[in-house]
Image (cartoon, coloured by chain):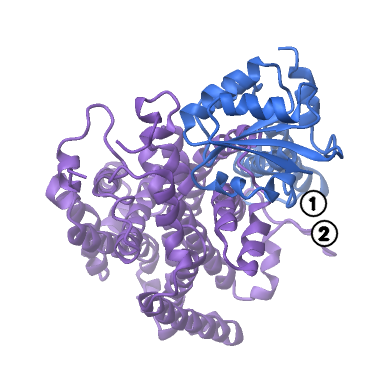
Chain colours: A purple, B blue
Amino acid sequence: MAQTEAELLDNPVAGHPALILRSPDYHSITEAVAAPIERPTPIGWWLFFLPSLALLGLLGVAVSWLVWEGIGVWGLNVPVGWAWDITNFVFWIGIGHAGTLISAILFLFRQTWRTSINRAAEAMTIFAVMCALLFPGIHVGRIWVAYWMFPLPNQMGMWPNFRSPLLWDVFAVSVYGTVSLLFWYVGLIPDLATMRDRSKTQIRKQVYGFFALGWRGSMRQWRHYESAYLILAALATPLVLSVHSIVSMDFAVSLLPGWHTTVFPPYFVAGAIFSGFAMVLTLMVICRTAFKLEHILTLRHFDYMAKIMLVTGTMVGYAYGTEFFTAWYSGNPYEYFTFLNRAGGPYAWAYWIMISCNVISPQIFWFKKARTSIPILFVASIVINIGMWFERFVIIVTSLHRDFLPSAWGYFSPTIWDISCLLGSFGLFFTMFCLFVRFLPMVAAAEVKGVLPQANPHSRSGHGGAH
Amino acid sequence: MAFSLGSLVAKAPFANQLPQGPYYGVVAEFTTAAELYHACEKVRDAGFTKWDAHTPFPVHGLEKAMGLPRSPLPWIVLVMGLTGAAAGFGLQWWVHASAYPLVISGKPFFAWPAMIPITFEVGVLFAAFGAVFGMFALNRLPMHHHPLFQSKLFERVTDDRFFISIESWDPRFDSSATAQMLKSLGAANVELVES
């Protein structure tokens, strides 16, 4: 192993940059992926898991109190009727989108570098959608009638209003959650079979075996499997674009200055991918270090992700500019006031946090040194996620807090229960993620094996494996 | 190809159970994808029909080396997707224009442009169900018990080894000659699997 990771980055093999370092054989990939599941639970895992579980408990308390006492425990009130609840919802659903982008869109574009990160990114999508679904569920007030959001026959003969973007959102997010789960599970089947065949204990063999469905890697099965995977990717791609577009229509279809903007769908999608990649990066840095997966999650992967963040972050910055231009060009005094108020009003602090985190901080990724430095990537990814949370806060709260008449102006401040719900949703997310890395293969081993040079039956290295 | 109709019927969902016999068949282990690929071409050319290749990951182009037809799954997905879209659109039309017409924001009852997002979402949902459950049906999954699982060798199919299995009810099957042929094609190990 003469080449170091840095050398490979600077000097990729002509035409075929090595995605996976140290020229591993198939078996060492299996070992590397299965090791975090099979070895005794490390102390470090508990150090992540227990605080996450505590935050999840906080979420339980906060949601129970909310249901018991009512929405008044939160800080929102007229004129700010939507605040942290919907901010958190849009934030989490946006986080999920990078998972689908990595698993579906990069798959369609034959970007084989995705194989190292797609499993964890898809898991992240599912957990983020769980967090996201929580908020619209609890913000309706009487959550015991939340099922009224669905078109169920009832004794009143009433139906939801299908002409409202809020209902489109119910459909978009629940379909998105379902399809993401199916996509993730289909991808897991071959690796669950690997876990089944390596099981040392009966219980493991039965549990992994049950979910592996009796997969035996047969080419007659792979043929349908690959077709299903390709089709799911092709379905998930327009789906993910539709979901955040529809989320943005919750705002854009209203008549409120600051929300009523045609740029919202593409702007929200770019922001979603931006924040989602930041979250993938945060998680991957932790996993790579904690589980010693440096040869599978290489600096090349981080380099690519940083580039995507630079692009989407700059797109988001462009959208911020477009909003201001449109507000000025529209000649509408309410529209213009809303945007001046955003940048210079009582919530100017939030606006400038958003600008510095989302537009200024990713510009560091113009430099290759920053794109391949794990500490810089880690810090930047957290900064970007903070910025993207503030983006949704700015859009939602600053557009609402100064109504058309000054007599109806207000200022939203969060209560302890707002904060508990937000922190608690992180508890839910990280608890699920900890369980995932402990019990499921976090790298798609079968797919990584498929991008090794010797996996191609026509390659010259096909005989013998290692070079 | 002479056997394509037969193999299609055999792959139809739930069309047949595994026949009974003393042997399930013979399984041969290969160490590289390239060896497996060339062996599959030979098995195909020898005219076997009831056989399969088993790999830890989908080997590119192997379906051609085995002479397999394309998966019919896209057609299932197409039908399911169109059904879902029609169901989604139909539900919205029925609710707003037929069952409970209600004036909301002065919009027409049959405001079809507003019905497109949900039509799309339900179409995608049904199509995804079609893709996943259609794939399960075509592959006859879940099938938790299979004779191949008795083979100790075969456990490495999900790790780093490549296999060809030829089933005993293939008309050209002969337990010693077939095993011999697989050995001559470069198999590292050949094993008879009981049924």
> Which quadrant: the N terminus of chain A?
top left
The three-letter amino acid code for the residue at tag 1 is Tyr
* Residue receiving disc 1: B100
Task: Tell me where residue A394 appears, x and y as whole percent.
Answer: 33, 63
Question: Is residue A80 visible in the rendered structure shown here?
Answer: no
To which chain does the residue with label 2 belong?
A: A
| Position of residue B170 measured from the top left corner of the image (x, y, whole percent) | 78, 26
Of residues A301 and A141, the one nearer the viewer is A301
Q: Nearer the viewer, residue A78 or B67?
A: B67
As displayed, is residue A356 above or below residue A304?
A: below
Please tell me in which quadrant of the rendered image residue A291 appears. Answer: bottom left
Looking at the image, which residue is at 36% across and 46% down?
A270
At which x and y percent is residue B128?
Answer: 64, 42
Q: Name the amino acid type tagged 2.
A: Gly
Which mark is on residue A157?
2
Farthest top residue in view: B1
Which corner quadrant of the image does residue B65 belong to?
top right
